[in-house]
Image: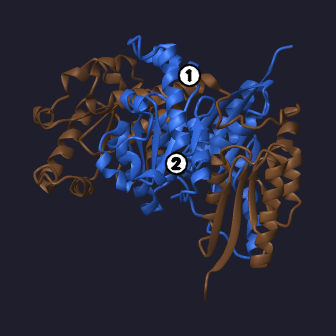
Chain colours: A blue, B brown
């Protein structure tokens, strides 16, 4: 039996980031259907809505089936144009607005672009500032500015520190520095002195030594750096330092940066922007 | 008249990234209500669900009002526990599953963590690979590896190239390098030779000269670099190069990285991971 195929459109008046996340998440619950998905962001004019209705009609004539449409459209006129076209319409946003109005006993603003735009200018500046901070303090450079850090991620080379810091900055506006534990520091078997005064900001990352070896082999040729023995030694020493210094830590092996970021926010209680 | 206040919880069995984006987006439509919002990710056990129900009950006794709950919970038992507690429940995920099952004529998998986890290992590796690539090629270093780029962002210093590249990598898995147009290249008034062979991969960023000056003044002391005259000159020269070389470009002044990223994906048609 061949898999079913189905066309879907993800439509938004903004970036479509939210609609795409929820739409793809819903579609991923149907693994036996092959979806051809097109994302249509910034649908914010009558003209674009008309073009999209044409695209939907074309899809129906070509495939013989109504496409699925997942939409976050705030404007009533544009939403109605799409929802009344020849498609299966899933209204990811408006579905909840009327019930929310009832519960809150007040009308909603119905304004576009309040989520991933720059309307919240302060929050946005914080996220970009945090991103620049992560880049400037990456890999243990500029330890002098650790006083500005909200969190300092500590771990061996290639344990996932940099992507985690950049994600914390971009998603949550958190000022995250990172500090790589070097050979001599691991040999010394104690927390590097430069980190001592920031102890309450430290958060450890560890990783399965075998996975660490894979990552290092893929990216570098230096045999000693990527040897099984070296990776096992470094990870064991790092974890011993975390435990002895009572530093919270996570194992990054099976976790995406999104999962690491969410767990770190949960475990530290850092504020979000 | 004082603003209304209301407690809300954003609850997910995963990272809560999707629930938070949609929940906050819905709440932002009620600017006259002050929300105290708590995000509760990784609610994936009976014990955590029981604790959350207790938290909800405590909120009701303390505030005298039922909290709003925005949830993406795939597991039926856990979802029922929360939805039947003393709250106003907004089911951001399951609301659409039954109608989707009807339309598709098939049952859904009801499996947790299919969106922001590592289940799609290849896609995830691509995103992290793209992030490393963006870091390694940042600011015009390593132009030798431009053959691996899917896009090369070109612009004057501080026009927003680096955050845009990192976002394209993290969100869409796009290999994005960036190249800063230097003084001498701007004086020469033509596309730098090293970029000639990659012309079809180039994408320009420009920025309002006044905003550019602000950014440069905030971050650097070098007077000439941040002078109004210098900023105006650089932006004018860069835009002239983009136009003459027929390079698509965007103005980053009023756009968030999410908006820049979504627009660039739309304008280039690059594939998403």
Which callout, 1 or 2, points at the residue further toward the start of the chain? 2
Q: Quadrant of the N terminus of chain A?
A: top right
Q: Which residue is mark 2?
A: A171
Q: Chain of mark 1?
A: A
**Based on the displayed image, in which of its 4 quarters is residue A184 positioned?**
top left
Q: Is residue B270 left or right of residue B152?
A: right
Q: Position of residue A211 (x, y in %)?
A: 57, 21
| Image depth: mark 1 or mark 2 in front | 1
Residue depicted at 39% across the width and 42% down the height: B163
- The answer to which of A249 and A100 lies nearer the viewer is A249
Q: Position of residue A52 (x, y in %)?
A: 62, 41
Q: Position of residue B10 (x, y in %)?
A: 70, 57
Q: Chain of mark 2?
A: A
Q: Which residue is mark 1?
A: A209
B230 w.r.t. A55: above or below: below
Q: Is residue B250 visible to us here?
A: no
Q: Position of residue B263 (x, y in %)?
A: 46, 41
């Amino acid at each position: 039996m061949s898999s079913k195929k189905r066309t879907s459109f993800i439509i938004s008046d903004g970036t479509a980031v939210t609609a795409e996340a929820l739409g793809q998440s819903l579609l991923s619950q149907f693994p036996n259907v092959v979806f051809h998905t097109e994302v249509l962001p910034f649908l914010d004019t009558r003209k674009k809505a008309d073009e999209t209705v044409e695209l939907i009609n074309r899809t129906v004539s070509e495939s013989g089936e109504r496409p699925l449409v997942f939409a976050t459209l705030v404007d009533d006129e544009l939403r109605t144009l799409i929802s009344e076209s020849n498609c299966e319409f899933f209204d990811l946003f408006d579905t909840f607005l009327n019930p929310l109005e009832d519960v809150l006993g007040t009308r909603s603003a119905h304004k576009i672009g309040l989520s991933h735009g720059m309307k919240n200018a302060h929050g946005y500046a914080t996220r970009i500032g945090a991103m620049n901070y992560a880049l400037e303090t990456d890999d243990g450079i500029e330890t002098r500015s650790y006083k500005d850090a909200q969190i300092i991620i500590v771990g061996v080379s290639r344990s996932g520190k940099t992507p985690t810091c950049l994600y914390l900055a971009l998603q949550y506006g958190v000022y995250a520095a990172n500090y790589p534990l070097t050979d001599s520091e691991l040999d010394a078997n104690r927390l590097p002195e430069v980190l001592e005064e920031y102890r309450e900001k430290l958060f450890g990352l560890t990783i399965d030594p075998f996975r660490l070896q894979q990552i290092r082999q893929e990216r570098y040729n230096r045999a000693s750096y990527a040897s099984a023995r070296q990776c096992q030694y470094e990870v064991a020493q790092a974890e011993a330092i975390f435990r002895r210094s009572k530093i919270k830590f996570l194992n990054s092996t099976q976790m995406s940066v999104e999962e690491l970021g969410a767990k770190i926010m949960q475990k530290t209680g850092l504020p979000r922007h």
